[in-house]
Amino acid sequence: MAGIYIHIPFCKQLCFYCDFYKSNSLKEKPQFIEALKHEIELQKNYLEGEKIETIYFGGGTPSVLNGKEINSLFQKLSEIHKITDNPEITLEVNPDDIAKDYVCEIKTTPVNRLSIGIQSFFDEDLLLLNRRHNKRQAINAVKLSQSAGFSNISIDLIYGIPGMSVENWKKNLEQAFEFNVQHISAYFLTIEPGTVMAQLIEKGEITPLEEEENVEQYSVLLEQMVQNHFIPYEISNFCKEGYFSKHNTNYWKQEKYLGLGPSAHSYNGHSRQWNIAGNDKYIQSLMADSLVFEREILDPKRRYNDYILTSLRTMWGVDLKYLEEEFSKEARDYCVSLAKRLLEYGMIDIKNESLILTKQGKFIADNIISELLMAD
Ligand SMILES: C[S@@+](CC[C@H](N)C(=O)[O-])C[C@H]1O[C@@H](n2cnc3c(N)ncnc32)[C@H](O)[C@@H]1O
Ligand code: SF4
């Protein structure tokens, strides 16, 4: 089973922290959709006929697409690919795009999962992040999506926002639980180089939280999720039983995926490739019948490192049997020998021949992961 990711590279306003590829000029949307359909044709053999289990409209802001545009893209995909009978089809939506008419329109498309970019229910955080929506729109977005009949809803929240207190972070989580949504992604705010947020911090206009405050917010997150019966299935992802994001889980389980649109990444088990990040160049090259991308062939060391990087962040962990079957006995032994010290320190556990982060380990997940990688 494989997945398809479609990158919608437009945003009506640019958030200060975000370094995903997007443009705030929507003028080219019609040409972009035509180019995308052409890319679907050009890339028709990439997945070698594998059935499509998940389709994910990400961004940027996929909710700049109307129902007709989503239907036409889905139609094109189903002409080219075999899609399972019950695919998971996710649309990322921004709260300021959610009105009653819009969600009802989306409900008539094959989209069956919404991922709403709330980030925070506090206006002060939303202003600091330069989000386009406010608290009232955030609340309405969830309510309207539920009233329209969506029963698989995820919301994105961010913690570690400068100025955010632990109290407010708890309130954000409580508000999320009150809605009874099926899935929550809670990300630690990363300060990406070159973003407005990074510049504001550099100039001293914004002060990041202290390390202890970030740690406390993550600790609250883990506690609250368990208390509210959410499964912590990945460092930043939590769901009610049966509501794992199939699309993201497939990335973490090394399934193949095709990424369409500017900057989108694809993976076929042997190589990764990524499209050019530029709307003009993307559209022009497709009009000239070609696709501009770069490709990296993955040698065994790179594939091993990619597997450790993604799997250790999940509750399924690093499967030692898989390491032996997919790589070699040496790769398994190498990993086990590096893991010994981490096991002694209680940072990881070993269960059913899998290495799994303990609660303590989750706080320093990136360090633990780097301990298990193969050096260059
Ligand atoms: C790329 S956005 C696309 C979704 C949609 N455009 C939105 O903003 O609501 C996907 C999610 O990534 C998260 N994100 C993006 N940049 C981030 C950063 N620097 N730190 C933490 N989370 C980030 C946000 O929670 C966001 O909802
Ligand atoms: S966080 Fe979402 S809305 Fe904001 S700039 Fe990034 S992609 Fe656009």
Image (cartoon, rainbow, N blue to C red):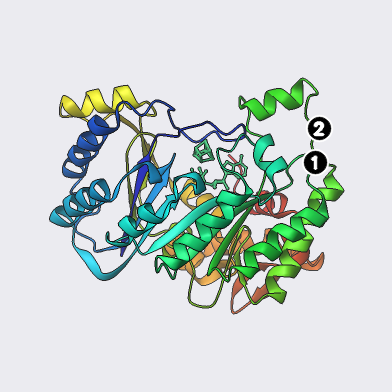
Q: Nearer the viewer, residue 352 or 144?
A: 144
The quadrant the C terminus occupies is top right
Provide residue 15's location: percent of width, then percent of height: 57, 34
Measuring 62% from the left and 57% from the top, which residue is drawn there? 236
Measuring 77% from the left and 20% from the top, which residue is drawn there? 203
- Evaluate whether residue 272 shows in this view: no
Q: Amino acid at mark 2?
A: Thr
Q: Amino acid at mark 1?
A: Gly
Tag shown at residue 163? 1
- Evaluate whether residue 156 shows in this view: yes
Q: Nearer the viewer, residue 30 or 336?
A: 30
- Residue 135, relative to residue 49: is it above or below? above
Relative to 182, 339 lies left or right? right
Q: Earlier in the sequence, mark 2 or mark 1?
A: 1
- Residue 326, relative to residue 18: is it above or below? below
Q: How many neighbours does mark 1 have within 10 angstroms: few (below 14), some (14-19), or many (20 or more)?
A: some
Mark 2 vs mark 1, CA separation in Å: 8 Å
SS type, badge 2: loop
Give the mark toward the camera: 2 or 1.
1
Q: Nearer the viewer, residue 139 or 41?
A: 139
Tag shown at residue 207? 2
Tag shown at residue 155? none
Measuring 20% from the left and 52% from the top, which residue is drawn there? 77
